[in-house]
Image (cartoon, helix red, strand yellow):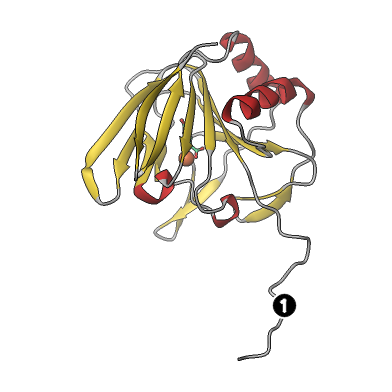
């Protein structure tokens, strides 16, 4: 297993990459294409619904609830075929990840817009690991306080990227479209904090 490159490690966050971390990437790519339940969800932009420009699949440890396309869904358990990969990523990152969002960029036209992985259920300074299989694509970051400040990392062929510290507060990231590209699948490993079922903030007397 290779060492890692530190791309950022300061008061705005931590970003490191293990190059070619995952072996047999072509086999994994095909296994995930065949084995996951891919969907194209829709988003509403300026009052009009559009299909998002990529396919997605969620999976996770049994019982983990995640929000997807406006719904709360419950994971059925790790698909057996990916469990060894999940265990290896958890061990490498030192995190007990319990859910994965898979993104399939079918061509260079598929992309992901600017966002931060800052959903409240991920907690305040989440560690998110991202494994890239297949075609190399640019992963771009821009700093919230100064958008001219950017970082571009080309990710492909088994690269494992780890985001941590306050990164999601200070930077957004995206995968822009590209003139020509073959299939790429990216898995983002997340730790979703679970509220007990039906838990609501208890009614408190006003003080
Ligand atoms: O495809 C990638 O490298 C990024 C995916 C991502 O940012 C996400 O799933 O939140
Ligand atoms: Fe993201």
In this rendering, does residue 122 appear at all? yes
Q: Which residue is mark 1?
A: 202
Quadrant of residue 88 within the rendered picture:
top right
Quadrant of residue 82 within the rendered picture:
top right
Taking 203 as reference, is 89 left or right?
left
Taking 118 as reference, is 37 left or right?
right
Please, is residue 18 above or below residue 47 in the view?
A: above
Residue 157: x percent and y percent? 49, 14
Residue pictured at 37% horizontal, 44% vertical? 172
Instruction: Name the secondary structure under disc 1.
Output: loop
Residue pictured at 31% horizontal, 28% vertical? 152
Residue 64: x percent and y percent? 74, 46
113 or 50: nearer the viewer: 113
Q: Dividing the image into 4 quarters, which one contains the C terminus? A: bottom right
Some atom of ligand 1 lies within 8 Å of the CB belonging to the residue at label 1: no
Residue pictured at 75% horizontal, 67% vertical? 199
138 or 168: nearer the viewer: 168
Taking 78 as reference, is 96 left or right?
left
Quadrant of residue 23 within the rendered picture:
top right
Please, is residue 114 above or below residue 136 in the view?
A: below
Taking 86 as reference, is 162 left or right?
left
96 or 99: nearer the viewer: 96
Residue 182: x percent and y percent? 45, 16
Residue pictured at 63% horizontal, 43% vertical? 191
Disc 1: CA contacts within 10 A as few (<14), some (14-19) or many (>=20): few
Q: Dividing the image into 4 quarters, which one contains the N terminus? A: top right
Residue 80: x percent and y percent? 79, 24
Please, is residue 132 above or below residue 172 in the view?
A: above
What is the number of callouts on the image? 1
In this rendering, does residue 139 appear at all? no
């Amino acid at each position: 297993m290779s060492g890692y490159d530190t791309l950022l490690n300061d008061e705005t966050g931590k970003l490191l990459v293990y190059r070619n971390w995952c072996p047999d990437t072509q086999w994994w790519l095909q296994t995930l294409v065949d084995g996951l339940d891919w969907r194209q969800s829709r988003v509403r932009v300026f009052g009009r619904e559009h299909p998002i420009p990529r396919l997605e699949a969620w999976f996770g440890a049994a019982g983990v609830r995640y929000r997807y396309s406006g719904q709360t869904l419950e994971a059925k358990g790790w698909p057996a075929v990916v469990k060894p990969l999940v265990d290896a990523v958890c061990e490498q990152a030192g995190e007990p990840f319990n859910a994965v969002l898979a993104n399939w960029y079918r061509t260079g036209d598929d992309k992901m817009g600017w966002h931060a992985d800052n959903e409240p259920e991920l907690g305040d300074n989440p560690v998110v690991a991202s494994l890239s299989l297949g075609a190399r694509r640019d992963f771009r970051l821009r700093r919230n306080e100064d958008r001219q400040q950017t970082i571009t990392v080309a990710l492909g062929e088994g690269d494992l990227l780890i985001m941590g510290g306050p990164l999601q507060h200070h930077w957004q990231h995206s995968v822009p479209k590209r003139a020509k590209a073959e299939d790429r699948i990216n898995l983002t490993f997340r730790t979703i904090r679970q509220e007990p079922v039906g838990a609501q903030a208890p009614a408190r007397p006003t003080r």
